[in-house]
Image (cartoon, grey):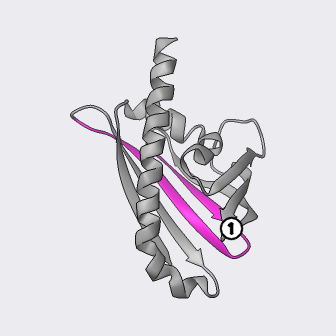
Amino acid sequence: MLSIRADQYINCSADDVYRQVCENYFTFQPVWDPAILAMRAASDRPIAVGSEAEISRLFRNKTESGRSTVTDLVAGTSITVLNCYPRSSETRLISCQQLNAGGTRLHVEISYTLHSLARLVAPLSANLLERALAISLRSAKLELEKGIHADEAS
């Protein structure tokens, strides 16, 4: 197993960040994760434990399809999602924490269950993956702040 994590400060309330990131998880994940090419929710119902989506990602320069399932949802706080692919799976925990000074700490933790040769190179990849996640979260910050502030203006 390989785990990576990153945090990002978002200049918005935890409720707003949770609403954008967790309640709209299937549409927002491709925005901040460049490896995710597309996600399509299985239904139009509000996201809940058991909600599923078909997922397409770039893996070793090839497109790979899989299934994304919400395994835990703590209203206003966090979402846990399991993404399953033919050669690996990953659990993503995304949480929002309101900070006393204002703003929100967005925390993302990804645990990979790897198969075959990927297990051998995983320790070498961890640092690179963690840096890529931090860069992705900076991109998410910009999108979140732009979207939330646009909603407030309308």
User: Which residue lies most toward the top here?
Assistant: 154
> Where residue 74 sits in the image (x, y, percent)?
49, 46
Q: Nearer the viewer, residue 45 or 103?
A: 103
> Where residue 147 sits in the image (x, y, percent)?
51, 27
Residue 128: quadrant of the picture: bottom left
Amino acid at dot 1: Asn
The residue shown at (45%, 80%) is 124
Residue carrying label 1 = 61
* Residue extent of the magenta highlight: 77-100
Q: Is residue 59 left or right of residue 94?
A: right
Q: Nearer the viewer, residue 36 or 47?
A: 36
Query: Element type at marker 1?
Result: loop
The residue shown at (42%, 45%) is 138
Q: Is residue 81 left or right of residue 50?
A: left
> Where residue 107 sits in the image (x, y, percent)?
39, 51
Q: Is residue 108 visible?
A: no
> Where residue 62 sits in the image (x, y, percent)?
73, 67
